[in-house]
Amino acid sequence: MNRYHLLALLLTICYTVASAQVGVSINEQNMKIPRGNKPEPIKTTPQKVAEPDVTINTATLYYNLFDSAQSAITAQNFAVAETYFSRMLAADPTNENNSLVLSNLATVQRYQNKLQEALKNYNMAIDLTPNAVTLILNRAALLTQMDSLEYALHDYQRVIAIEPNNAEALYSHGTLSLQQGRDSIAAEDFNTLLGYDPNSGLAHQGLGNLYKARKNYRKAVQYYTDVIRVKPSSELLANRADCYLMLQQLNEASKDIQQALELTPDDALLYVLRAKLNKMRFNYEDVERDVKLASKYGMPRAQVEQMLK
C-alpha cells in the first residue's frame, strides 16, 4: 500500500460511525456506517496554497500535492485540500490512482456542502472503477443526504450484488426501506445481516427500529437493549425510552432519557421525550420547561407541541 492509499482510507473514515457488536465477541470493524447526515461545519482559516517546485517531474509533483492535501485534511482545512486534489488530477490525468483522488475530492467538497460538485466527482470516480465498493457507499451516503433516496437505494443494492454480506449496505438499504414504509424489505435486509453475523449490532439496531415501526415495543426494547448493553448511544437510548413511554414504563424511560442527555445535552428531541414523560406524570411545569429547552436547541415550538399531542 503506497502513501496515497493511506489517505483514501483516512477520508473513508471521515464518513463512518463505529457501532457496537452484540455478545461476548465484539468486532467493530464491519460496523462503520455513513449516517447520511450533513457533516458538522468546521471553522477554518483559509491558507495560501503553496506553489510547487517547477523543477520536479510530474510523478513527484503528484505525490507532493498528495502530501499537501493530507496536511490540509489533518488541519481540517478542506477548501485547501480540495485545491490540492484538483491539482493532482491536472498534474497527472491518467494516473491509476485518480479514481480515489476524485473520491477524496468529492468527500472534502461534501464537508463544504458542495453537494452537486461532490456528486459529479463520485460519479466520475465510479465510472473509472465501477465495482469499487467504498466509492459506491460514499455516493450512496451523499445521495441520502441529498434526499435522493431511490438513487441511494440503487447504490446499496449495487454493493449487495458485489458483496452480499456487506454490513453497511444491508443496514443502510434496510433503514432507507423502513423509512419509506417498505418494512418487509427492511426485515429481509436486517435478518440477512443477522444471518451473516449473529453478533451484529447493526442487525440488532435495525430490528429494533423495525419492531418499533410495527408498534411491537416490547420486541423493539429487547433488540435495543442488546446493543445498549455493549455500547450505549444517545440515539439508541432515545429510541428505547420512546418504547418505554409507549409501554407506560415511566421509570425506565426516565433513566434512558437522563443517560442520553448526559451524552448529548443539546439534542432537542430528548427534551421532547422528557416533556412527554412529564406530561404522563402530570408535571406540567416541567413540561413547559422542556418545551422551551427543545425550542432553544433548534426545534420549533409548534412542532414540539404537535409531537406532544
Image (tube, rainbow, N blue to C red):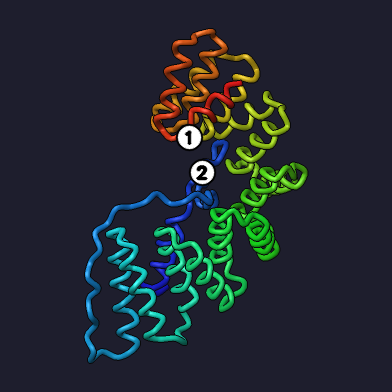
Question: Which disc number belongs to residue 136?
Answer: none
In which quadrant will I find the N terminus? bottom left
Distance in Å between CA atoms under marks 1 and 2: 9 Å
Q: Position of residue 49 (x, y in %)?
A: 25, 73
SS at badge 2: loop
Residue 156 appears anywhere in the view? yes
Q: Position of residue 244 (x, y in %)?
A: 60, 20
Q: Please tell me which residue is depicted at 43% across the width and 35% down the height of the picture.
A: 298
Q: Identify whether 48 is placed above or below 21.
A: below
For the residues labelled 1 and 2, say whether their Cβ atoms are less than 8 Å apart. Answer: yes
Q: Please tell me which residue is depicted at 61% across the width and 74% down the height of the picture.
A: 130
Tell me which corner region of the image, top left, top right, bottom left or bottom right, holds residue 227. Answer: top right
| Dot 2 amino acid type | Ser
Looking at the rendered image, the disc whose residue lies closer to the viewer, 1 or 2, is 1
Q: Please tell me which residue is depicted at 69% across the width and 43% down the height of the picture.
A: 178
Looking at this view, name the residue that lies furthest to the top. 282
Tag 2 residue: 19
Q: First in sequence: mark 1 or mark 2? A: 2
SS at badge 1: loop
Q: Identify whether 86 is placed above or below 244.
A: below
Q: Nearer the viewer, residue 296 or 52?
A: 296
In which quadrant will I find the C terminus? top right
Q: Position of residue 146 (x, y in %)?
A: 55, 56
Looking at this view, name the residue that lies furthest to the right. 184
Q: How many marks?
A: 2
Q: Please tell me which residue is depicted at 63% across the width and 38% down the height of the picture.
A: 204
Question: Which disc number belongs to residue 233?
Answer: 1
Tell me which corner region of the image, top left, top right, bottom left or bottom right, holds residue 126. Answer: bottom right
Q: Position of residue 257 (x, y in %)?
A: 48, 23
Q: Nearer the viewer, residue 292 or 58?
A: 292
